[in-house]
Amino acid sequence: MPPTDRIRDHAGQGAATTVAAHRARRRLRADRARQLADLLRHQLLTDAFPDGTLPHENTLAADYGASRNTVREALDLLRAEGLVERQPGVGTVVVARKYPHGLDRLMGLAETLREHGRVTNEVRTMGPAPAPAPVAERLRVPPGTDVLYIERLRRLNGLPLSLDLTYIPLDIGGALLGADLENTDVFRLLEATTGRRLGHAEITLEAVNADAHSAAVLQAPRGAAVLMLERLTHLSDGRPVDLEFIRFRGDRITMGGLLHRSL
């Protein structure tokens, strides 16, 4: 190989190595920014900054052993989630909060969030409807049997929080047609109607993209991620009485619980 070609080849290898190293540094910084954002998010959600203002970027960098650029990228991630904003002359401030929803107790939304404000319900649809086969199977009624169908928009302190779709066997749900669903949890009404306590529930939690209808009702961007809680609640005698599909605004709720290890 002529000397000039060898020089070009080495130069090309050097440039490629430099680009690869630069990409690796960016990837490492992005990883560290994500890790830092996770730590700061937890503090935001547990009111670790009571005055609503985060420490200066230099302070965060020193506290977490991170570079200023890493801190800025972490704050950008939190800003994109709508949790913080940058205010000139003030710094980075908390502009949104999430409310805790426990997963280790069977409670209605108003019971769960009673310490955080008032839950109200806008009943959008309510009435008998034929049970789709999957609903009928889970509620143990014949397919096509009428069940009570309820669609509610639930607000906390006036802010849209969840869109609930509920199916209840009609022999129980019929008594709810004249009930005060705007201010009362369905759980309380079920116990009052049946004279029995609720026993247990099977739950599934996943993230889904908001469809056009859900996004409009929840006042969330179309396609935004929402938390979907599917819950089948049983009476104390084991009878399934309440099948719900609940879409929570993911930017306003956190799910948590206490788990015990058993092998």
Image (cartoon, rainbow, N blue to C red):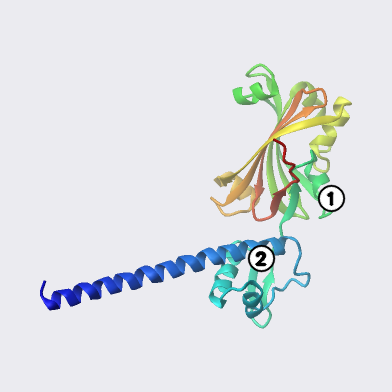
Nearer to me, 251 or 78: 78
Work out whether residue 61 can be spotted. yes
Nearer to me, 138 or 261: 261
Q: Residue furthest top?
A: 142
Which x, y percent locates residue 158? 76, 55
Q: In the picture shown, does residue 52 fall above or below 160? A: below
Which x, y percent locates residue 60? 65, 75
Which x, y percent locates residue 25? 45, 70
The residue singled out by tag 1 in the image is 114
Category of crowding for the residue at label 1, using alpha-carbon neighbours closer than 10 angstroms: few (below 14), some (14–19), many (at least 20): few
Total marks in image: 2
The residue singled out by tag 2 in the image is 40
Question: In this rendering, would 109 be left or right of 247?
Answer: right
Q: Report the amino acid beneath label 1.
A: Arg
Residue displayed at 61% across by 64% down: 37
Nearer to me, 158 or 96: 96
- Label 2: which secondary element: helix
Residue displayed at 66% across by 62% down: 41
Q: Quadrant of residue 80?
A: bottom right
The residues tagged by marks 2 and 1 sit, at their Cα atoms, a distance apart of 26 Å
Q: Which of the marked residues, 2 or 1, is nearer the chain's N terminus?
A: 2
Q: In the picture shown, does residue 45 fall above or below 240? A: below
Q: In the picture shown, does residue 106 fall above or below 167? A: below
Question: In this rendering, would 204 be left or right of 260?
Answer: left
Residue displayed at 73% across by 43% down: 259
Q: Residue furthest left?
A: 2
